[in-house]
Image (cartoon, rainbow, N blue to C red):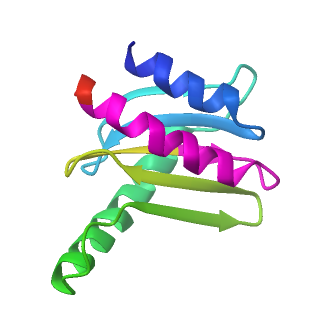
Amino acid sequence: MEFKEILGELVERVDGARAAILMGYDGIAIDEYRKEGVDTDIQLIGIEYSSILKEMKRASEILEAGEVAEVSIVTGKGMVVVRGVTDEYFVMVSLTVDGNLGKARYLMKMAAPKLKNLL
C-alpha cells in the first residue's frame, strides 16, 4: 500500500473528511489526498500548523509530559486532526464542521503504523 492509498482511505471512509496529508514537522509534504471537487489546500494548512505542532512537541518535552500523540483543532469553518507518525512526521485530516471526528481519530490511529512502515 502506498502513502496516497492510505490517505485516500482515511478521507473516503470518514463522513465530512475533505483531505489528508502526510507531512514533516518541517512543513515538507510527503504525499496528500483530496476528495474530488474539494478545494481545501491541505498543504497550506499543514505548513501553517506544523510550526505550532513543533512548539507543542517542544513544550511537552520540557514539561516531561510524554509525546504529543494527537491534536484536534476546531474552528467555525471546520476541523483538523493531527496524529504523530514518527518524531519527524505527522498525518493530518481536514474535516467539515459536522464531520465525524471520532471516526477520523480512530482511522488515523490505525493508519499511523502503516504510514510509519512506509517511511
Extreme-right residue of the structure:
98
Taking the image as shown, residue 76 lies to the left or right of residue 73, namely right
Q: Quadrant of residue 85?
A: top left
Give above or below for 3 relative to 78: above
Q: Position of residue 46 (x, y in %)?
A: 44, 48
Give the dominant element type of the magenta stretch: helix, strand or loop: helix
Give above or below for 60 relative to 16: below
Taking the image as shown, residue 114 lies to the left or right of residue 103, namely left
Residue drawn at (39%, 12%) of the image: 1
102 drawn magenta? yes
Q: Position of residue 65 (x, y in %)?
A: 26, 80
Q: Position of residue 22 (x, y in %)?
A: 39, 36
Q: Quadrant of residue 97?
A: bottom right
Taking the image as shown, residue 91 lies to the left or right of residue 38, namely left
Magenta residues, start to end: 93-116
Residue drawn at (77%, 48%) of the image: 99
The front one of 71 and 94 is 71
Extreme-top residue of the structure:
1
Quarter of the picture containing the C terminus is top left
Residue drawn at (57%, 46%) of the image: 106
106 drawn magenta? yes
Taking the image as shown, residue 38 lies to the left or right of residue 107, namely right
Q: Position of residue 98 (x, y in %)?
A: 82, 53
Q: Quadrant of residue 15?
A: top right
Q: Tell how many labels.
A: 0
Give above or below for 96 relative to 75: above
